[in-house]
Every structure is written in structure tokens, then in C-alpha cells.
């Protein structure tokens, strides 16, 4: 009897158990491949760089409780005090910062009242210290000069002399690569302003991976404004290693300038942690469920194969007595599992794709990669081989003498 | 007899301890994981106000036209312009109505005390009646306060505890931006999840701490934090902004079921009138949704949670198949025992019953393991998920009962085929083979 026939026969005899294993592998594969796709996407989304010097930056908020008629003077003295603190590299006042969770967005036009083909972007304010504070490098053009910085509030603003934009936005607006010096319409349909500088990367304040805000993550504009509002946000960059000490000093300093304010400080590391907490949390929960699932499937194969070995003790003994080598017995069990697992994996590949299509249609899911499906299939088949190795070796060690004794259905160990 | 089966069950389970442990772990893990996500999902997708969700409606009117609206499906944005909101409010087509937007205010109970900053929904007095808000002290403000935009305020129980040590603060006042707001009511605990009236600010978090009249907020030009959108540049002056096509107001209406058709046509007629007047250059395009339709439309439950739920139930299914395979193997392995019992006169029924008792025991122990895993799971969710969802991951009596029933049902379901196989073991044949 050739070994292929042996394997087929053996599988046929225990068909129900074999079907159970194959179905388990198919479902496990479908879940595993989709979970890996989703987890990889979440992790790469949540670990992308914002482009700023995250390790050394923190933010300070100062919130006026009573109406303050002189917000401009207050902000100027706040900034001067922050820049003068020991351990501070630079500081500026802004309206929003990367990963804040919400901020300003604008749609940019190349002509007045452009109807279609506008580019959405995040919209930041900053003075001539902004680039230095954030640690951004200009790849083209120039920084703002102090004379260009203008005061504004949420709704009324003077026209600016120019914008600094990110490389991605520049490429989107001017695919030919001649963005520098070209005029764009932002926030206004009457007075355009030129792009005076381009930075390599500056992520927006929004953190949703999907939906509208996910479409312009890397498009940002820096406008030379000072936002005068009851609520001031300062970005501060500290010398390496001095962050914690500078944060405490800054909180105290701002409180001493005007005690009638709510002052809070938050490091960029904390901002990032909060921004991606749900993304990473979901990835972790899904990973935990998937790992347990794979473990359960492996243990199931192990358990069922162990039983088959016990059940077929006598048959194995006879084969051994008739001259089958230990290796042949070991091979047989491994081959059996390989065939069952491969059949399951084939069904699983189809199921993975079907499940993925369904998920894409009904949930915020991305398309599955062929690599993930194939990788998961190979991994499960390998796991199957590992799971049956121990029971198969046990089978190979059955003595030919068993054939001479009466049937032994019970495991010898009690 | 049952005791005898139970004794046999324990004997059998003890005989192959490893397989038994695997079986119990499989059922426990499957039930535990699926119950953890189910508890979270149920908490997030349940009807926030079951008694009234089908009588509360949010109104959408397309005031931007087919070319300018976009992003949202069906060409709607989620808010109304102030013009449309006020006009529909004046039409009084519903039993009760309220306009809503959320602002941010800083309040103080005394001039020198530490201020409390919080998102504050600006609403009409009817809002509280519409949503069945429970009051601990006082009640909503009166319609005259709505009209006048009076500086009155309703506090949450939590804020009352914080500012007034839980005393009846009705009649006292809070200082907000130099204006004294008179407290007219203090809410009791109000578990409204999700807070469907404003899905922008932590919808799964705690209830808002302060509420002020809509017209008061508009008169104070209180900043909008619930979201606003302008297609043309936003007018810098507040009064111009109010009369612009910028959208930022929600209109919620309470309409008894028999009158809803009339209300829908009222809204539609209003939009048609706007076209006739030349303000809209497109046919009336309106939508009136109830609470659950609104939550679905706004994707209030994160889609990722659905994926997680699906994964855990797939997991439960695999665990069941696993347990079934192991039980089957055990049954086949015990064929000899069963055939002897059959030959000694045990009926098929007796064999089947005995096998079911055995699976029941597995299910019960599996349920205990599952409960432990659910507890660990909810704890894990509380630690890894953002705070606003974390409060939802809890284990209540209902989940525990569902879990125990589910585990036993799962074990018995997994044991059905093996039981059937056991019952059909032939007594004579088996003895002959041996």
C-alpha cells in the first residue's frame, strides 16, 4: 500500500474529525489574515512621524477666565518669558499642533472661488520662530520674517504676505514642481498669497485614519499669524533631556504672569499616546484574540491527533511488525495533517478574501494583501506540522509487540 | 440516576485530563472573548433612550445645493443653518422642539474660586422634557427664558457636588464671563449613552455638566465647538454669520408617531418654499431621522468594533469545533466501554443522557473560565482603550447570566454529534471485534 493511499484512507476513516480540523483552519486563516492586515495598518498609521522634534517638544495652554482686552500684549509677554526660560530652545504661539485631535482645516484654491479640484489641508499659525521650535527643515524657499507676522482672531484676519506649505501639499497643488512663488487662495477668495517656503513634512492635527480628515494627513499650511484668543496655545522646544524640568518651570512661569488663567502643559509624547490610544488599543485586543485563536486551533490539532494515535495503536503495531519504519509512521501522521491543513488552508484563502470584501463594504476596513493571506496560510500549515509532531512521534514509538497483544484503546498512562 | 451520570462524567473527564483541560479551555476562551466584545458592543450600540427613540427626530435641510454639499452621503451635512433652524423652530410643527449647539464656557461659583471649564450644550427648555432628563432639584427653565435668552443654567449632579457640595443650588448663581447665571435645576445621574444630541464631543463619555438657553448662547456669541461649516468664507461679524449659509445648528423634534408624516411634509414644504423664494436653486431636499437612524447615519459605533465582534464570534465558533473534535475523539476512544455498558443493558437513552451530563459539566467549568477571561478582558479594555470608551467595558449581572447559558449551550451543542455517535455504538459487534 503506497503512502498516499494510506493517508487518503486514514483521512476518510476519520472524516468528521478531519473536516472539523479543516474548517477550523479555514476560519482561523480568514480571521488571522484579516486581523494581521488591520493590525499592520493601525500600527503603521499610528507610528508615522509627525515631522517635528517630538522628543523635546511640549505644549502649554493658557486659558483666560475673564475677558482680557489686551490679549496681544499678554501673549507677547508669555512668549518672551517662555523663550527666556533656561533649557528652552525656542517657542511660539499657535492655533493647533500635530495629533491634537482637532484643529483648523481649509480648502485651497488656485483661482478665486474655484469649484472643483481644491486641495484640503490642515491650517497652522506661527511666527518666525515656528520652524525652529518644531525642528522643521525648509527644503525650498525662506522662513517668515518678523515684519510679516500679523494679529488675527478666529473670524477676522488681514491678508498675509505668504505661506509655508508641506512638500506633499505643494506637489498636490503644483504637480509640475514649481510651487515656490506661486499664489494660492486660502480662507479668502479675493487676496491670494504666494508660497514662500516648503517644508518636508508636518502632519495635521487630525487623527482619524478614515473619512474626510484621513485624506490630507500630510498636507499642512503654516500662515504668519498670531492668534489672539482667550485660549492661547504655546509650542515649546526644550534642550535634549531638559523637557520635564522645563515643562514644570513653564507652567509656573505662565501662572505667575497672570494668575487668573487655567494653565496646562502636555508633552508631545503624551499627545501622541492619547491620539493613538484607541488605534493601538484595538490592535492589541485584536492581536490578543487572534493569538489565542491560533493557539486554540493548534491545541485542537494536537489533541485530536493524539487521540487518533491512541485509537490506531493496534494498526500501527501491525504496520511496524510488517516492517514499516518509525520514520514511515511519523511521516504518515505528518502527511495526514499536511493534507487536511492544506485543504483547510485552500478553503481559508477563499474565505479570507470573501470576508475581506464583506468587511470593506460594511466597516472601515482596507483591502487585504496577498502576502498576508499566503503568509498566514503557510504559518498555519507549519503550526499544524508542529502540533502533530509530538503525537506522531508517540505513534512512531509504538512497539510492534502491540500487534500481538489485544487491542489497547485506552491510553496506557492513566 | 443523575448522580450516577455525574459520577461517571467525572470519572471519564479525569481519565483524559489533558483532553478535558483542552476542551474546557477552548470553551472558556471562546465564550470569554466573545462576551467581552459583546458587552462592549452592546453598551455602545444600544438604544440610548428606548422609551422615546422613535419619537425624537433630527431634521436635515440641504441649504448648500447639490454642487456644494459633498462629503456626507446623500448630499447632506449634519447641521442646519441658523436661518433654517430658527424658521423651522417658529413653524412649531412638533409637540416639542429644541435647537442645539455646543459651546465651551468657564464657570465660577464665587469670584475667587477655581473656574471649571466644560463643553456646554445650548438648548431650549423643552430639551429636558424631550429627553426625559431626571432632575434632582428644580427643573428646566421656562419658555420665557428661552425667548429672552435669560442667563439661567442647569447643572449636572457631578458639578453641583463639586461647586455646591451636593446641596440644593437652585436660586444660587454661577459667574460665566462676568455674567451671573441663575441655577434653575440640577440633574440627577443621567446615563445617556451615547449622547446622541451631540456626537462631536466624547459621545460615549459622561453627561454634560452645564446647559444654558440657546438664545442666551447666541446673544453671548459663545464659540461653537460642536462643529460648523461654511462653504464661503465665514463672515467675521457674528450677526452676519447668523444670517449666512454657514451650518452649525441641530434641530431635534419630538413628534408622536401618528403625526410624523405631517411633520415630514412640513419640513419639505419649508424647503420647497425656500426654492420658490429664490434662496434655494434646487428642489426641496430634506431628511427627518429618529434617534437610531441618526446614530446609524453618523456611524456612532466605530466600525472597528464590528470587526472585533466578528473576529471574537469567529473565534467562539472555532473553539466550539475544537471542543466538538475533542469530544468526538473521546467518544470514539471509549467505544469499548460504551459497548460493554450497552451489552449489560444500558439503553441508548441512558448512554446519550450520560454523555450530555458530561458535556454539561464541561460547559459549566468552561463558563467559570469564560467569566474569568471576560473579567480580564474588560479590565484589559479599560486599560488599553481611550477613556471615553473605557467606562463602557463592564461586566453586569445580565452578561454573567448570558455567559453561563452560552457556555453550557456551546458545550452541549459541541457534544450533540459525539453523543449521537455514542448512543449508536452496537453492543454485540464491539464485543465480537474484541
Image (cartoon, rainbow, N blue to C red):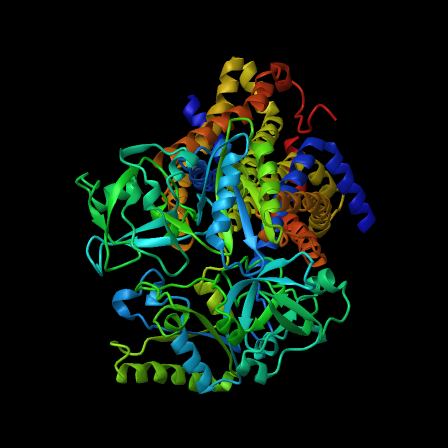
- Can you say whether A407 is above or below B392 in the image? above
Nearest to the observer: residue B343 or residue B409:
B409
Nearest to the observer: residue B118 or residue B114:
B114
Q: In the image, what residue occupies the spot 39% across and 61% down?
A: A155
Give percent across and percent down for residue B333: 65, 34
Give percent across and percent down for residue B64: 31, 70
Q: How many marks?
A: 0
Give percent across and percent down for residue B253: 50, 78
Q: Name the quarter where the C terminus of chain B is drawn.
A: top right
Q: In the image, what residue occupies the spot 55% across and 80% down?
A: B146
Nearest to the observer: residue A236 or residue A399:
A236
Give percent across and percent down for residue B36: 62, 49
Task: Tell me, yes or no, if residue A199 can be seen here.
Answer: yes
Q: Is residue B28 left or right of residue A254?
A: right
Q: In the image, what residue occupies the spot 62% across and 50% down?
A: A259
Residue B248 falls in which quadrant of the image? bottom left
Q: Is residue A229 left or right of residue B212?
A: left
- Can you say whether A118 is above or below B169 in the image? above
- Can you say whether A362 is above or below A163 in the image? below
Q: Is residue B388 left or right of residue B7?
A: left
Q: Is residue A250 left or right of residue A207?
A: right
Nearest to the observer: residue A387 or residue A59:
A59
Task: Tell me, yes or no, if residue B425 can be seen here.
Answer: no
Amino acid at each position: 500500500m503506497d503512502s498516499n493511499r494510506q493517508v487518503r484512507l486514514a483521512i476518510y476513516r476519520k472524516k468528521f474529525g478531519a473536516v472539523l480540523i479543516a474548517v477550523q483552519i479555514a476560519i482561523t486563516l480568514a480571521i488571522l489574515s484579516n486581523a494581521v492586515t488591520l493590525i499592520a495598518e493601525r500600527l503603521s498609521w499610528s507610528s508615522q512621524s509627525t515631522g517635528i522634534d517630538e522628543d523635546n517638544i511640549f505644549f502649554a495652554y493658557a486659558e483666560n477666565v475673564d475677558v482680557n482686552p489686551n490679549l496681544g500684549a499678554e501673549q507677547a509677554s508669555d512668549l518672551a518669558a517662555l523663550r527666556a526660560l533656561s533649557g528652552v530652545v525656542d517657542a511660539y504661539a499657535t492655533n493647533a499642533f500635530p495629533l491634537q485631535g482637532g484643529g483648523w482645516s481649509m480648502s485651497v484654491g488656485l483661482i478665486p472661488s474655484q469649484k472643483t479640484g481644491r486641495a484640503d489641508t490642515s491650517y497652522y499659525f506661527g511666527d518666525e520662530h515656528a520652524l525652529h521650535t518644531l525642528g522643521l527643515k525648509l527644503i525650498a524657499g525662506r522662513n517668515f520674517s518678523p515684519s510679516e507676522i500679523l494679529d488675527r482672531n478666529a473670524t477676522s484676519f488681514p491678508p498675509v504676505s505668504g505661506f509655508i506649505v508641506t512638500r506633499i501639499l505643494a506637489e498636490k497643488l503644483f504637480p509640475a514642481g514649481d510651487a515656490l512663488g506661486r499664489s494660492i487662495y486660502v480662507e479668502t477668495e479675493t487676496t491670494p498669497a504666494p508660497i514662500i517656503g516648503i517644508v518636508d513634512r508636518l502632519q495635521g492635527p487630525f487623527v482619524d485614519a478614515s473619512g474626510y480628515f484621513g485624506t490630507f494627513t500630510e498636507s499642512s499650511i503654516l500662515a504668519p499669524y498670531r492668534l489672539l484668543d482667550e485660549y492661547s496655545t504655546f509650542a515649546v522646544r526644550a534642550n535634549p533631556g531638559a523637557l520635564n524640568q522645563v515643562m514644570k518651570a513653564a507652567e509656573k512661569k505662565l501662572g505667575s504672569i497672570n494668575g487668573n488663567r487655567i494653565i496646562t502643559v502636555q508633552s508631545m509624547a503624551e499627545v501622541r499616546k492619547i491620539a493613538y490610544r484607541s488605534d493601538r488599543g484595538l490592535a492589541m485586543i485584536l492581536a490578543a484574540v487572534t493569538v489565542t485563536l491560533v493557539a486554540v486551533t493548534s491545541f485542537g490539532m494536537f489533541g485530536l491527533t493524539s487521540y487518533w494515535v491512541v485509537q490506531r495503536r493496534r494498526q500501527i503495531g501491525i504496520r511496524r511488525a510488517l516492517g514499516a519504519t518509525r520514520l514511515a509512521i511519523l511521516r504518515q501522521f505528518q502527511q495526514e495533517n499536511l493534507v487536511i491543513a492544506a485543504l483547510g488552508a485552500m478553503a481559508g484563502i477563499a474565505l479570507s478574501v470573501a470576508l475581506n470584501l464583506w468587511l470593506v463594504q460594511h466597516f472601515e476596513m482596507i483591502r487585504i494583501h496577498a502576502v498576508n493571506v499566503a503568509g498566514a496560510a503557510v504559518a498555519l500549515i507549519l503550526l499544524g506540522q508542529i502540533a502533530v509532531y509530538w503525537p506522531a512521534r508517540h505513534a512512531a514509538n509504538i512497539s510492534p509487540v502491540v500487534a500481538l497483544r489485544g487491542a489497547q484503546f485506552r491510553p496506557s498512562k492513566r | 440516576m443523575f448522580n450516577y451520570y455525574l459520577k461517571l462524567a467525572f470519572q471519564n473527564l479525569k481519565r483524559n485530563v489533558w483532553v478535558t483541560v483542552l476542551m474546557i479551555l477552548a470553551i472558556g476562551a471562546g465564550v470569554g472573548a466573545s462576551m467581552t466584545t459583546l458587552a462592549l458592543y452592546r453598551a455602545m450600540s444600544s438604544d440610548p433612550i428606548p422609551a422615546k427613540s422613535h419619537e425624537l427626530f433630527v431634521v436635515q435641510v440641504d441649504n448648500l445645493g447639490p454642487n456644494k454639499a459633498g462629503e456626507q452621503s446623500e448630499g447632506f451635512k449634519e447641521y442646519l443653518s441658523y436661518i433654517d433652524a430658527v424658521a423651522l423652530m417658529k413653524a412649531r410643527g412638533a409637540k416639542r422642539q429644541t435647537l442645539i449647539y455646543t459651546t465651551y464656557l468657564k464657570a465660577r461659583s464665587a469670584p475667587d474660586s477655581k473656574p471649571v471649564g466644560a463643553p456646554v450644550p445650548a438648548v431650549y427648555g423643552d430639551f429636558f422634557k424631550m429627553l426625559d432628563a431626571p432632575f434632582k432639584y428644580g427643573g428646566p427653565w421656562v419658555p420665557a427664558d428661552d425667548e429672552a435668552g435669560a442667563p439661567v443654567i442647569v447643572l449636572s449632579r457631578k458639578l453641583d457636588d463639586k461647586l455646591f457640595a451636593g446641596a440644593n443650588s437652585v436660586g444660587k448663581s454661577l459667574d460665566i464671563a462676568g455674567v451671573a447665571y441663575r441655577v434653575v435645576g440640577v440633574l440627577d445621574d443621567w446615563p445617556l449613552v451615547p449622547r446622541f444630541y451631540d456626537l462631536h464631543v466624547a459621545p460615549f463619555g459622561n453627561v454634560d455638566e452645564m446647559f444654558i438657553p440657546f438664545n442666551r448662547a447666541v446673544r453671548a456669541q459663545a464659540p461653537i465647538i460642536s462643529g460648523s461649516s461654511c462653504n464661503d468664507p465665514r463672515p467675521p461679524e457674528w450677526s452676519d454669520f447668523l444670517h449666512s449659509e454657514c451650518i452649525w445648528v441641530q434641530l431635534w423634534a419630538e413628534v408622536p408617531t401618528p403625526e410624523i408624516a405631517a411633520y415630514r411634509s412640513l419640513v419639505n414644504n419649508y424647503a420647497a418654499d425656500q426654492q420658490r423664494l429664490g434662496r434655494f436653486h434646487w428642489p426641496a431636499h430634506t431628511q427627518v431621522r429618529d434617534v437610531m437612524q441618526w446614530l446609524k447615519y453618523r456611524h456612532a459605533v466605530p466600525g472597528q468594533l464590528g470587526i472585533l465582534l466578528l473576529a471574537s464570534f469567529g473565534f467562539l465558533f472555532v473553539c466550539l469545533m475544537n471542543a466538538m473534535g475533542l469530544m468526538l475523539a473521546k467518544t470514539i476512544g471509549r467505544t469499548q466501554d460504551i459497548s460493554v455498558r450497552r451489552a449489560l443493558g444500558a439503553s441508548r437513552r441512558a448512554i446519550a443522557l450520560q454523555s450530555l451530563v458530561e458535556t454539561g459539566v464541561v460547559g459549566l467549568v468552561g463558563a467559570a473560565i469564560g467569566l474569568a477571561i471576560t473579567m480580564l478582558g474588560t479590565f484589559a479594555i479599560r486599560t488599553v482603550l481611550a477613556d471615553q470608551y473605557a467606562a463602557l467595558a463592564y461586566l453586569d449581572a445580565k452578561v454573567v447570566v448570558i455567559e453561563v447559558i452560552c457556555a453550557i449551550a456551546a458545550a452541549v451543542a459541541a457534544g450533540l454529534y459525539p453523543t449521537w455517535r455514542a448512543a449508536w455504538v452496537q453492543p454485540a459487534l464491539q464485543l465480537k471485534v474484541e
